[in-house]
Structures are given as structure tokens and as C-alpha cells.
Image (spheres, rainbow, N blue to C red):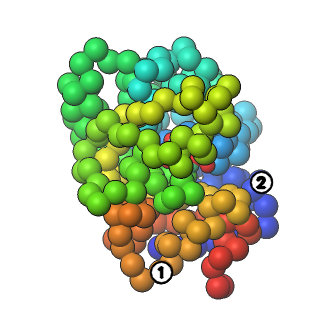
Amino acid sequence: MKFKVFDSYEELSAYSAELVAGVIREKEDAVLGLATGSTPIGLYEELIKLYDDKNLDFSKVKSINLDEYIGLDGTHNQSYRYFMNLNLFNHINIDKKNTHVPNGVAENLEQSVAEYDELIDSMGGIDVQILGIGPNGHIGFNEPAEQLKLNTHVAELTKETIKANARFFASESDVPTQAVTMGMGPIMKAKKVILIASGENKAWAVKSLVDDVITTSIPATLLKLHPDVTVLLDKKAASQLEV
Ligand code: F6R
């Protein structure tokens, strides 16, 4: 794992966008594994700037998102499909047919989650996976547990995650309690992983990435087994590191 600490969120975002741009410049039909939440918004803004400046072409790029709330369809303003359109896809020349977010309102959820894994395989796997991290160390919605799931599945959100995500909803009781999430398998199989974290509330989870422990009770620690992970932090997220 490589770590890099930035003075500001803006610098972190610009650097992470350059890493993603590098992957696309090397492979025009790259498969991007994408995350939602507050953290990657700056990265997406920087990718849009690169596109606007004619420095990046998304016409052949494909994307696959980590997760989606159950019960919210793509038109709901808190769905992750809506988030991706709003914060990235509507502003670049990606073909929306090449963008994939799990279906949170599928009639047959079991079939839909199984098809998501087949889709990832049919795309040839993920070239670069963007990850945020939960204050509890979750990645995607792979929440701390005795066992983690390998494949795409329906996850129960922990109280802590519901609380953390309540800021986007009118009230905590409006936050869905379940989500479809990619499992640890496709994340660990991604050729490259970029984990970004900003803010004091991530410092504990970030510290767990440098300890000599791997535990399913902090899912992000499994990334220590991945050969190509870059962790990009602002100073607050890095505040419990001893560097
Ligand atoms: C979102 C996702 C989550 C977030 C994490 C951090 O697609 O998979 O794991 O990355 O909850 O969220 P923020 O960035 O809002 O702090």
C-alpha cells in the first residue's frame, strides 16, 4: 500500500483525478469502478475539468459502481444512479449505456445481484477501483462483520452507516436500511485500487490500514492483501498516522 498525504482536499482530488486519467490514457476502454458519497465529488469535478479542457476522452470508457440503496430507483435524488449522473456522467462524453449501477428496485433481487457479478466478469474486470472508506472501515457497503461476502449481495447497513449517511436525507428514518453492494471479490480483483479519505472522522479507519492486522471487523484492512493500492489522504484523515 502506498500512502500520500495532501494539505488540502482540493489537492487530493486533483491528484486522484490524474491517476484515473492516466489509466484512461493508457487504455481508452478502461473499466472504472466508481464510488459515491462526499469524498469522490472533488475527483469527479477534476475529471470533468480534464474533459472540458479536451485532455480526456470518455467515449469508450465503461464504469461499474460499487453500490445502490434498496428501494430507491434511479430518479430518486438520493439514489446512487442519480448521484453519478449529477456529479459525473451528465458532464462528460461517456456513453450512459456503458455505465452501470446496481438496481435497487429489481423485482428479482437475487437474480439481479448475480447478474451484476456476471456483468463485471463480462467487462473483463475493473481496471481502477475508486474507494471511499466508512468511519467504521467499510468499503462499498461491506460492513464490519464476522464474515464478509465475496460476491455482489444485499447488505444490511449498520446503525453507524445509517447515521453517517443521514446528512443526505430529510431525517435518519428516511435512510434506506439495505443496499446492494459489490462484494470483496471484484474489489480485490481490480487491477488498481485508489482509496481516498478526507476529514477527521476517517482518521481511525485510516490508521487501521497501517496496523499489522487484517480483520473482517474492519473490511478495508483486507486491501493490505492487494498488490496495487494507493491511499490518498488529506491531513485530517491522516492525523492518527505517525509519519
Ligand atoms: C459509496 C460507498 C461507501 C462510501 C463511504 C464513505 O459508494 O461505497 O463505502 O465510500 O461510506 O462515504 P463518504 O465519502 O460520503 O464519507
**Residue 38 percent across, percent down from the top left:** 65, 43
Whole-percent x, y for residue 95 in the image: 49, 23
Q: Which mark is residue 97?
A: none
Q: What's under tag 2, amino acid-wise?
A: Glu
Question: Residue at the location (43% across, 21% down)?
Answer: 71
Residue at the location (49% across, 72% down)? 209
Q: Which residue is mark 2?
A: 10
Q: Tell me if I can see residue 55 in this picture.
A: no
Crowding at dot 2, Cα within 10 Å, few <14 / some 14-19 / many 20+, comes out as: some
- Residue 147: x and y in percent read 26, 57
Front in this rendered view, residue 95 or 118: 118
Compare marks 2 and 1 and give the one earlier in the sequence.
2
Residue 68 shown left or right of residue 90 in the figure:
left
Quadrant placement of the C terminus: bottom right
In the rendered structure, the answer to whether residue 4 lies left or right of residue 208 reads right
Question: What amino acid type should be assigned to the residue bearing mark 1?
Answer: Asp
Instruction: Give residue 211's mark.
Output: 1
Q: Quadrant of residue 3?
A: bottom right
